[in-house]
Image (cartoon, helix red, strand yellow):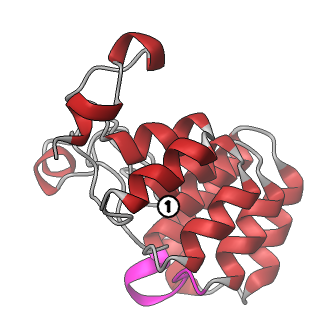
């Protein structure tokens, strides 16, 4: 079944077929009925972003929009809370929720085991900086209280490429 042709009316959802998969659109729109139907039809909850420029996973979409119940459901379905965002203008679920001030979703993601050290350190520090930049002080406080701030975190924070729109290795190398 081609879920794009069967389910997704691009005009209705104001999305181009190359930008989002149907499950990603359903999550972004908060359409739980469509989301559940797509799951029954075999949609992949962990489908990666379709495009490297602003693409996102279902979990990232729901997290950015602040759909707490849907985020919880997606996590219960074993979506990867550490999935990387699109290389260009992408956000992880934690980064997107933090940037948009979704305090409850940030807490849910932290509780779900999103990585904040090791491979997740840069994404964690980016989440704090996105929230700070947008004036979401409660989110910054929550994130910083999740674990002790380290010298390694400070080094990441001082990296001039931290919030650069193109997070691909090639994009960062151009700076």
User: Does any portion of residue 120 appear in the rendered image?
Assistant: yes
What residue lies at 37% left-to-right and 83% top-to-bottom? Answer: 119
User: Does any portion of residue 130 appear in the rendered image?
Assistant: no
Estimate how packed mark 1 is, as few (under 14), some (14 to 19) or many (20 or more) residues with alpha carbons within 10 Å: few
What residue lies at 76% left-to-right and 83% top-to-bottom? Answer: 146
Q: Is residue 50 left or right of residue 34?
A: left
66 in the magenta segment: no
In the picture, the quarter occupied by the C terminus is top left
Q: Is residue 86 left or right of residue 14?
A: left
Secondary structure of residue under mark 1:
loop
Q: Position of residue 172 (x, y in %)?
A: 21, 50
Q: Position of residue 102 (x, y in %)?
A: 76, 51
Please report the bounds of the magenta region as a residue range. 113-121
> Foreground residue, 83 or 167?
83
Pointer 1 residue: 158
What residue lies at 82% left-to-right and 58% top-to-bottom? Answer: 103
> Foreground residue, 136 or 85?
85
Instruction: Determine the residue located farthest toward the top in the rendered image.
Output: 11
């Amino acid at each position: 079944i081609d879920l794009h042709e069967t389910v997704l009316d691009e005009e209705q959802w104001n999305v181009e077929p190359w930008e989002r998969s149907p499950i990603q659109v359903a999550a972004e729109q908060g359409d739980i009925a469509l989301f559940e139907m797509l799951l029954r039809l075999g949609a992949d909850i962990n489908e990666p972003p379709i495009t490297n420029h602003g693409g996102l996973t279902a979990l990232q979409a729901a997290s950015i929009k602040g759909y707490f119940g849907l985020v919880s459901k997606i996590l219960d379905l074993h979506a990867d809370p550490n999935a990387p965002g699109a290389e260009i203008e992408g956000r992880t679920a934690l980064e997107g929720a933090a940037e948009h001030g979704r305090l409850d979703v940030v807490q849910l993601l932290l509780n779900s085991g999103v990585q904040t050290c090791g491979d997740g350190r840069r994404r964690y520090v980016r989440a704090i900086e996105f929230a700070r930049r947008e004036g979401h002080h409660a989110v910054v406080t929550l994130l910083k209280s999740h674990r002790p701030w380290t010298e390694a975190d400070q080094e990441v924070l001082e990296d001039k490429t931290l919030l650069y729109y193109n997070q691909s290795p090639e994009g960062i190398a151009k700076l």
